[in-house]
Amino acid sequence: MNSLLTIAQMYRADSLAIASGISGETLMEAAGAALADEIAARWDSKVRILILCGPGNNGGDGYVVARLLDAKGYQVRVASLVKTDQLTGDAATMAARWQGDVLDVSSGLPKNLISEIDLIVDCLFGAGLTRALEGVAAEIVAQVGQSGLPIVAVDLPSGVNGDTGAIVGIAFKASLTVTFFRKKPGHLLLPGRGHCGEVVVADIGIPSSVLDEIQPNIVENTLSTWCPHLNHPNADDHKYTRGHAIVVSGGMTSTGAARLAARAALRIGAGAVTVASPPSALAVNAANLTAIMLRRLDDETTLTDMLADRRIKAVLIGPGNGIGPATRANVLQALNSNAAIVLDADALTVFENDPDILFKAIAAHKFGPVIMTPHEGEFQRLFNDIGRNIESSTEDAGGKVGAAQAAARASGATIIYKGADSVIATPDGQVAINANAPPWLATAGSGDVLSGFVAGLLAQGMSAFGAACGACWMHGEAGARIGRGLIAEDLSEIVPDIFRDIDPD
């Protein structure tokens, strides 16, 4: 159920269902019935409802909703952007079944109409809209928005792009969105997610077997995405068989990021974690580490020397490391090892002027996965051509998903394009959208903890996609449980509680 369908894939799902013998009329009746049921479950029959219908199938859904709510005793009014004789197909059939009046709003909403309404149902355009709302439609959306009335949207609020979550000019801001069969990326990606309110996915009779032919490659990141791949220690395991991770520290005044990441790696299950520290920071790191080991990193004992130890399964470089030759050298040395690699923060920015050197080193790294965890600024610095190129690409979904897909393909690494709507993309085309991150995670050091989670899961032998998805989900869940007042140090400490709940054995 966590598969996400693009607009084109959802059209394909409808077509396959119809080809299997389910009529479009039956699907539209089921969609309208699901919407009517969700409204009836939340608002009593005293509310006065205005259903705004558009020229396509979303409008057809609206006529079904109107008929069914009217039968339940609701006070329903229908308004349409087009005359009913301009409708075609199933939408025309449903409009003909509606026995009430249809208010023509092709010139705008009548004066004082909004004051006579308690609830708006948006059946104007839905997910398929690709151009900006303009003219009367845009005026109606603005008027309704200014009214403060609750809005229920069919499929997606009109004005939200279903593939990218972009606001196409102006959009309704719904308190409830009812979509069908599967969610779309636009339900999870910002800013569109903020316009959807509660999202309900209704079963309208499309068989799940259509997914076998569609083969969707985008999923919502949920427990089912990654938890089945979580490794469980055996009775005879010891700290090194559970996975040893190295986290590279910055200098004396920038050690906190590495320690946050190292503790996160240990908490999420790595059996051993070592902080590799430059000489200037040894004292401050030693004073603040207990279960985490410490090793000197300098010209005499390089990262290459450390990673010759095959017990080391993952290395994290970047948090607080500084943008200089040492960081650059550490990245290239790590990519010449057998360890899985996590590159974050300064380890990305240090290659902003010559990313091809980094990408070639990743291509030559044959012994383990590489994950990069850029936030928006780091992404733009390292992949400054990606945004321009994806608009004309037929391989990618567009928007943030398309950018992450293109970056993964260009770099050869799995990308965690961070944010409140983090997108995880692998070079072979797998994509997950993580939508459980609360705003409390917008605090210093939060990203360092995330990169530590990634390194800790990689050290235990998880795949790049599994580790990236697991780290993002755990990070969001930890933030949600802690809530307001969260600081980065809190995130690792709640991990045992989360594991007890999701994996009680």
Image (cartoon, rainbow, N blue to C red):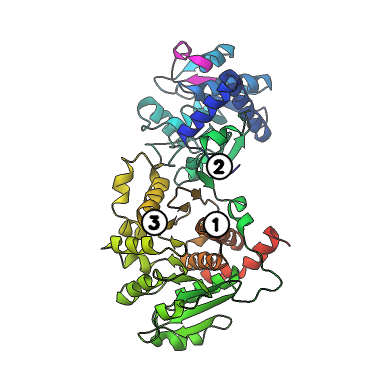
Q: Is residue 86 magenta?
A: yes
Residue at (28, 51) in percent of width and height: 385
Chain part drawn in magenta: 78-90
Q: Which kind of residue does numbered mark 3 sit on? A: Gly
Q: Which kind of residue does numbered mark 1 sit on? A: Gly
Q: Is residue 215 magenta?
A: no
Residue 9, relative to residue 471: is it above or below? Answer: above
Residue 455: give x, y in percent of width and height: 51, 67
Residue 366, relative to residue 425: is it above or below? Answer: below
Disc nearest the viewer among 2 and 3: 3
Residue at (36, 32) in percent of width and height: 131
Q: Which mark is residue 3?
A: 2
Q: Determine the residue located farthest toward the bottom in the rendered image.
A: 283
Q: Which kind of residue does numbered mark 2 sit on? A: Ser
Q: Report which quarter residue 70 is drawn in.
A: top right
- Write down the residue under mark 3: 412
Residue 494: give x, y in percent of width and height: 62, 67
- Write down the residue under mark 1: 466
Mark 2 vs 3, N-terminal side: 2
